[in-house]
Every structure is written in C-alpha cells, then in structure tokens.
Amino acid sequence: MSEEITLQTITNDKRISVEYSDDDIVIIDNVRNLVDPQVTRMNMHLLTICTGGRAHGSINGQEIELHKNQVAVCPPNVTLTNLMVSPDFDFKAMFFTTRILQSFLREKMNLWNKVMYIHHLHVVSMNDAEMTYYSHFYEMLRMIIDNKDDAPFKTEVIQALLRAAFLALCGRMVLERPDVAAEDHATKASTSLFQRFLHLLSLTQEKHRTVESYASELCVSAKYLSAVCKKASGKTANEWITEHVLEEIRYQLCHTDHSIKQICAMLGFPNPSFFGKYVRDHFGMTPVQLRQS
C-alpha cells in the first residue's frame, strides 16, 4: 500500500533529522527512511538536490533518474513509485507548501506551473559552476539555521534567502524550456486564471466534476475557462479534469485499500455503475481488473 507524506508526518517522524521546519517549509538531509520504496504520495512540493550517487523512480508513470549535479522537483499530489537509490546517494531535500511557493515566486508562479504541469520537467541538470552557486545558498541557510540565538526576524531572513534561491531556480528551469516565457501583457489575466484552475484542480478531492462547477468557483463561464486552458496549454479544461481524474483513479485502485464504493464517492461519481463504465471506457478494464493489474 501507499504512504502519504505531509509536513506533519515528516516533523513527527523520529527517524528523520529535521534541519529546519515552520508552517510551510521542512528541510532535511535524508529521506531514504521517510519514503516507502514502492509508492509514496506527497501533499506538498518536494525539491531534491543530488550531490552524489543515483536515484531512480517514476512520477505519475514518467520514469526519472537523478544523479550528481541534478535537481528534481515534484509538485503536490503526484505518485512517486519504485524509488531506488544507490548506496552512495547523497542529497539535500526540502518540502514546501504551495502557499510559500506563491509568496516566493509571485508573478513568476505561472512560469513555474507551466514547466511543472504542461511540460512535466521534473529534473534539471546543473554544471559544476551552477552547483557551486546553489551550494552557497545552502551554506548561508545553514549558518542562519545553526545560529541558536533567537535573532529577530530569523524566519523572515530564512524565507528571504529561499525566495532568492527559488527565483534563480525558476530562471534556470525556464532556460530548459524558453518557450514558457513567451507571454505578452494581454495574456497575463488569462494565464492567471489558468494557474488558479490548476491549483483548484490539484486541491480538490472530488475531482470528477463538470467544467461548469470549476468555472463557477473561479467566477467565469465554462466556455471562457476552457478557451483560456486551450490557449495556455493546448488542452481544454475538460481534458485537464479527465487527466487528473484518471491519475487519481489509478492511484486509489492500485495503491490504496479503499473499496471501489469509497473511491467512487471520494472522486465524485454518482454511483459505482457509472464509475465502472468510466474506468472501462478509459482503461479498457473493470475497476477490479485495474486493481489486480
């Protein structure tokens, strides 16, 4: 079965040496004892910098490999499966909430979301000079954290330093996909709506809802929301909803012990019969067959 990772489970786990934590951020040096090697789901963002060795796994079925001088970023509510690490795997990791990421990136948040959700860029390679650049951020961070004095504004100083590092990383990710930065002023409002739609979709447990219901929460028409999604990502709002629903069905059936009736109700399907037809139409098998597979 799967293990769900939250900020609370990390900070309460006695096996984990937490370097720093507040309501939005946890910094640790070792996650090998934290995550299940088979299936893990996190309800917040994860950033890992590999300084030695290798790691291999899958993010929502997309295989990734992480080795020295690479940075991996996972958005919330993705499924990390088949994680394997080499004996010499060495890294730094940070878990953080969407709230703090938005405060760090502000107007650049749309670029980050494009890279994460549209282009699925989860691993960025760095050269030695770039790794040295980011290591300086970490060294300064550790100096502040290790200072036991209750200095005024310590949390604010830590977050200001992290904001600078995240802005630099966002810029580095944009270099990997320069097309994400192509945006004129006329499209900024619609881009903001698209980002809010993605955020709402990721947070909503009852994902099998109509475009109209999501549009209503965002105070726009369903037609306008779908047009904005199509322009921003090449996919309509309904296609985004379907993608998230299918991934959630796969996760719940394959990696939890929830009953089919529970999953049906959890995701917003009207009844098990409709849920079964939906699964057959998209996966080519019944919910029981998908679970057994």
Image: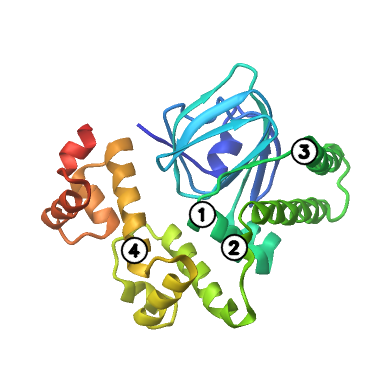
Instruction: For mark 4, give the secondary structure.
Output: helix
**Above or below for 82 versus 226:** above
Which quadrant holds the N terminus? Answer: top left
Label 4 and label 3: CA atoms lie apart by 38 Å
Which quadrant holds the C terminus? Answer: top left
Query: Residue type at mark 1?
Result: His
Query: Mark on residue 220?
Result: none
Instruction: For mark 3, give the secondary structure.
Output: helix
Q: Nearer the viewer, residue 234 or 222?
A: 234
Label 2 and label 3: CA atoms lie apart by 23 Å
Frontmost of labels 4 and 2 is: 2
Label 1 and label 4: CA atoms lie apart by 15 Å
Query: Mark on residue 180?
Result: 2
Q: Is residue 284 left or right of residue 138?
A: left
Q: Nearer the viewer, residue 151 or 56?
A: 56
Q: How is the image coloured?
A: rainbow
Estimate how packed mark 4 is, as few (under 14), some (14 to 19) or many (20 or more) residues with alpha carbons within 10 Å. Answer: some
The image quarter containing residue 268 is: bottom left
Residue 167 pos. (x, y %): 73, 57
Instruction: For mark 2, give the secondary structure.
Output: helix
Q: Residue furthest top?
A: 87
Q: Which residue has dot 1 on it? A: 119
Q: Which residue has dot 4 on it? A: 239
Label 1 and label 2: CA atoms lie apart by 9 Å
Query: Residue type at mark 3?
Result: Met
Please say if the residues under marks 2 and 3 sit with CB atoms less than 8 Å apart.
no
Estimate how packed mark 1 is, as few (under 14), some (14 to 19) or many (20 or more) residues with alpha carbons within 10 Å. Answer: few
Q: Which residue has dot 3 on it? A: 131
